[in-house]
Image: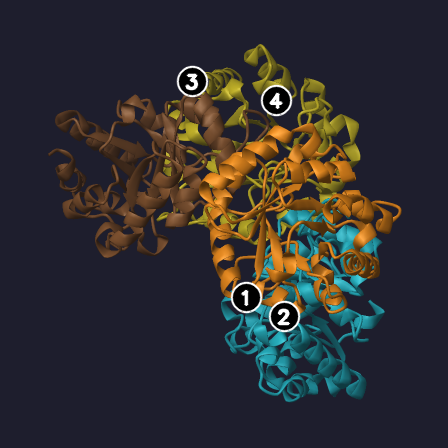
Chain colours: A brown, B yellow, C cyan, D orange
Amino acid sequence: MAQLKPPLLVINFKAYSQSSGKKGLELAKVAEDISKETGVTIAVAPQLTDLAFIAQNVEIPVLSQHVDNVNPGAHTGHVTLEAIKDAGAVGTLLNHSEKRVRIDIIDDIVKKARKLDLVTLVCANTAEVSAAIAALNPNMIAIEPPELIGTGISVSKAKPEIVTRTVELVRKVNREVIILTGAGITTGEDVEKALELGTSGVLVASGIVKAKDWRKAIFELIKPMMK
Amino acid sequence: MAQLKPPLLVINFKAYSQSSGKKGLELAKVAEDISKETGVTIAVAPQLTDLAFIAQNVEIPVLSQHVDNVNPGAHTGHVTLEAIKDAGAVGTLLNHSEKRVRIDIIDDIVKKARKLDLVTLVCANTAEVSAAIAALNPNMIAIEPPELIGTGISVSKAKPEIVTRTVELVRKVNREVIILTGAGITTGEDVEKALELGTSGVLVASGIVKAKDWRKAIFELIKPMMK
Amino acid sequence: MAQLKPPLLVINFKAYSQSSGKKGLELAKVAEDISKETGVTIAVAPQLTDLAFIAQNVEIPVLSQHVDNVNPGAHTGHVTLEAIKDAGAVGTLLNHSEKRVRIDIIDDIVKKARKLDLVTLVCANTAEVSAAIAALNPNMIAIEPPELIGTGISVSKAKPEIVTRTVELVRKVNREVIILTGAGITTGEDVEKALELGTSGVLVASGIVKAKDWRKAIFELIKPMMK
Amino acid sequence: MAQLKPPLLVINFKAYSQSSGKKGLELAKVAEDISKETGVTIAVAPQLTDLAFIAQNVEIPVLSQHVDNVNPGAHTGHVTLEAIKDAGAVGTLLNHSEKRVRIDIIDDIVKKARKLDLVTLVCANTAEVSAAIAALNPNMIAIEPPELIGTGISVSKAKPEIVTRTVELVRKVNREVIILTGAGITTGEDVEKALELGTSGVLVASGIVKAKDWRKAIFELIKPMMK
């Protein structure tokens, strides 16, 4: 977790054409440059097929977008925790609204990841689900109301009460887990609000990946983290 | 398809620890060397997380182990056909017994892959399923009775009638699709039998990946293809 | 199959509130009355939870909407072929566009159902998928382009070429399977066209279930079958 | 919840051939008779296909074994909360180890069930998952280590520390949820131990369904509840 010191920005490349293959590596390089310049923690979650390709070529923390709950072995088409580690990732996103996971599998993966010194960032769609996930002890939780994902309407500004209630319910169950805000984050003000509401950073995708100028978009978002 | 001229050997890396990350690249390099030395077509299907890492570093055909049926976009944790192409792959395995796929999705992916000039190698567990898949017009079909996968007992020797019947049923439906034999292939004799039974090559995983000497194991299998 | 003599009308109750519980039984009774009056084969596919409740109380053929690929045993929440038989059903729908199934599972279920003297009616979304399913030898196939389901725009009138091409591709693979037309069927003319195009009946849901007058709606559809 | 006053015995019929169709109704009738004779709460969870058939014919509480997360409508092969209510059930099991469910879906179903006055009994495989589920506020939780299910080795005797730890972690999160013990329960002593460890009853399947004498098997288990 040393590499993921909050406040932090996590960039999810999703399956966008703008972040695929060599373009994905380029985006990761821009993030790396800015992180070095500013000292702000920036992690990237490249497309699965680019994971080793990018992780072997940048020094900022790289996360997988998902892992499957299988051990190394005869599992064609599956992604293991061990494989993402061999690829050079420091951990993984899990249970994103676009790739939800069974509750017992989250429990299994969080426990296995801890043994392998890999970080888990588990997404949640409601305050209650955030609290449920907190009971499973991941390293980080991102609260992301799915109805706002990709809209450019940030949860921290449009529905701050969801973030506040998430922080409240999570803290009853787990005092240590790092909480991030996701969904609709596009401006520095969105990030500032997310930090004010008691979360330690943001999980962003389209707001950066689809921006015309990646450098400018990233700087806009990390400004409140540089104070 | 020019790159995948039969007879051919396809090596599926599965999720084995022996074929992950840098070890996966090393195995792909061995396959590349042998293919160049002998002229036999050898394709590799690395772990998803290593796809671009390996495809950017070898010149033999690289296949994905699986793709999801989504277009580029907001699909965290999914693998698109476009992403495997950007990664440098020439196509994909599909419907492996460890990663089965819905019938309508095979239809969709085969059609999309063709438009993108990507090759599809679709696995089948029975002669009837092979014929069904043949009706969907993929480039290649591999018949792999799941009960023999990983056993070292080859379908071509232990159950030749499955291969024969597969060829017969498939040819009623589709005269062009390339048929490969999979499951339990470990010796040159297994491969020889597979070619005799009317298939154009083999799909192999543990027989090579878990071998102590990759070079020796690959040479053993391609001997009958060099005649 | 004696009970399912074409031409036939299959009514899929789906999960509509209009066809649930006692209302479902009432609809099945209306279908039974009309079938007895007219001699036209009408089968019903009630909601899973009502299967035995309805099958024990009507004499027309009752189909399940889906089955899972497990044998009787420790499978909480699963529906077995044996259970639908014990419930009184004569067979099952499978692979409806709202409940798609893996290709190997269709193969398994068709084979098991045949041994248990249960009928399989497998849905397909395209002509190619219809041909693929035909290679698996179910008793019946229903071609249902999903984009027309529930629209009231019938495939037989709006896209007759899909039905024609389905019949053509299926017949190359399988001469015996009964082909039904589905999606958007609401008028007798839609049914008449479906029969003209070479199919043996229709699979209907909303066109009947959501009709204000079930009796009238069923009579409208079977008129062309009474000629 | 009035109908489900603890201590209680919940009998899961699973997909056993012994509890299917008319045999299922017979088993439910035996449970009903004993509940009336003794005053002990006994609930039954019949096979999905028998739900209305059984619920319409007994007066003890009937639960579904599973529900899908869809509203009434065009969802062929799905089971809605509304359909189980129309069938006569008072609620549903959810997330059984044989039918695990995504965490966000448990959250959705628990919330919807509450609005429909339906009871939720959510299964968990570990103490941590039990706590996570407790954060979602179902009516009941059953702790069932999957490795003991169907073994005849009861968790309450073989691994009492799992039950104790579950009660402890759940109570930190939720003071009201009823906790049941499951997995391997076959004797009155197993049940007695389950009550001593702080849970309010048991969830049993094979221990009763596969018993030669259902009446005797049920009496054996409820003895400790009659004190």
Quadrant of residue B10 within the rendered picture: top right
Q: Is residue B13 above or below residue D149?
A: above
Task: Find disc 2 in the rendering and name its residue.
Answer: D86
Q: Mark 4 falls within which chain? A: B
Mark 3 surroundings: few (<14), some (14-19) or many (≥20) residues within 10 A: some
Q: Mark 2 falls within which chain? A: D
Relative placement, left or right, of B119 versus D199 is left
Image location of residue B170, percent across then percent down: 68, 45
Mark 1 surroundings: few (<14), some (14-19) or many (≥20) residues within 10 A: many
Q: Residue at x 73, y 54 (%)?
A: D40
Tag 3 near tag 2, CB within 8 Å: no
Image location of residue A2, percent across then percent down: 29, 22
Residue B22 shows which numbered tag?
3
Residue C145 shows which numbered tag?
1
Mark 4 surroundings: few (<14), some (14-19) or many (≥20) residues within 10 A: many
Residue C9 shows which numbered tag?
none
The amino acid marked with disc number 2 is: Asp
Residue B206 shows which numbered tag?
4
Q: Are marks 3 and 2 on the same chain?
A: no
Mark 2 surroundings: few (<14), some (14-19) or many (≥20) residues within 10 A: many
The amino acid marked with disc number 1 is: Pro
Camera-near label (2 vs 4) is 2
Image location of residue B46, percent across then percent down: 48, 27
Q: Residue at x 67, y 20 (%)?
A: B186
